[in-house]
Image (cartoon, helix red, strand yellow):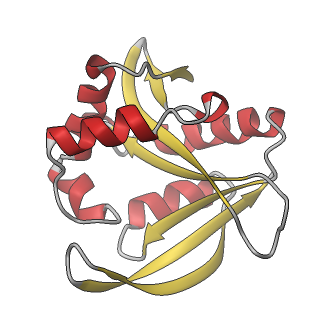
Amino acid sequence: MITLCPCKNNKHDAKIAFSWRNDPKTVAASYITLPKTWDSFWLEYSEGYFKEEQFCPVFIIESGEPAGFIRFEKTNLPDYPGQIIIEVMINVAPYRRGEGIGTEALGAVCRYMKTQNVFALLADIRQTNKASRNAFEKAGFSLFAQRTEYIAKTKENCCILCYLCKL
């Protein structure tokens, strides 16, 4: 059974998330398919991930150990004006992939966010990231939209699938 534990805004917690973010499979599946540098990640983590206390990042804890990382970002959808929509980004620890931890954690996130008066959760996933698509679908997310997006940092056009879970 998994639990969600709030991350601390410190270098210890950031280094755990950073090491998983730069795992080659994670990099390949990420929105921007480039490894991050520590300095840029630390700035993004410390200055960006904790803007709203109610939606700070969490570790997925399984058997007393961190098994994944989830961060949240408020967003808007024109179809649902005035509603609280949270984008979810998940990264399961490389040595824990394939165990269903991501799906179970997303279920826990849905239950928690419902208590926070969140209307819906959103996930932007590369079409080629089958593992994430499967985890989100098993957790109750449905394909909501699709777009081709130009990623300037990698100079590529990629297909992004937008998944939505109304709470």
- Up-down relation of residue 83 to residue 127 (above or below): above
Say whether residue 1 is visible.
no
Residue 136 falls left or right of residue 165: left
The total of numbered circles placed on residues is: 0
**x and y, in percent, of residue 86 in the image:** 65, 51
Residue drawn at (45%, 46%) of the image: 90
Image-quadrant location for residue 72: top right
**x and y, in percent, of residue 116 in the image:** 79, 34
**x and y, in percent, of residue 25 in the image:** 21, 55
Residue 54 falls left or right of residue 101: right
Residue drawn at (17%, 39%) of the image: 39
**x and y, in percent, of residue 88 in the image:** 55, 50
- Up-down relation of residue 75 to residue 59 (above or below): below
Say whether residue 167 is visible.
yes
Residue drawn at (16%, 38%) of the image: 38
Q: Nearer the viewer, residue 154 or 115?
A: 154
Residue drawn at (37%, 46%) of the image: 98
Image-quadrant location for residue 149: bottom left
Residue 81 falls left or right of residue 135: right
Quarter of the figure with the N terminus:
top right
- Up-down relation of residue 167 to residue 15 (above or below): below
Q: Nearer the viewer, residue 116 or 50?
A: 50
Residue 29 falls left or right of residue 60: left
Image-quadrant location for residue 48: top left
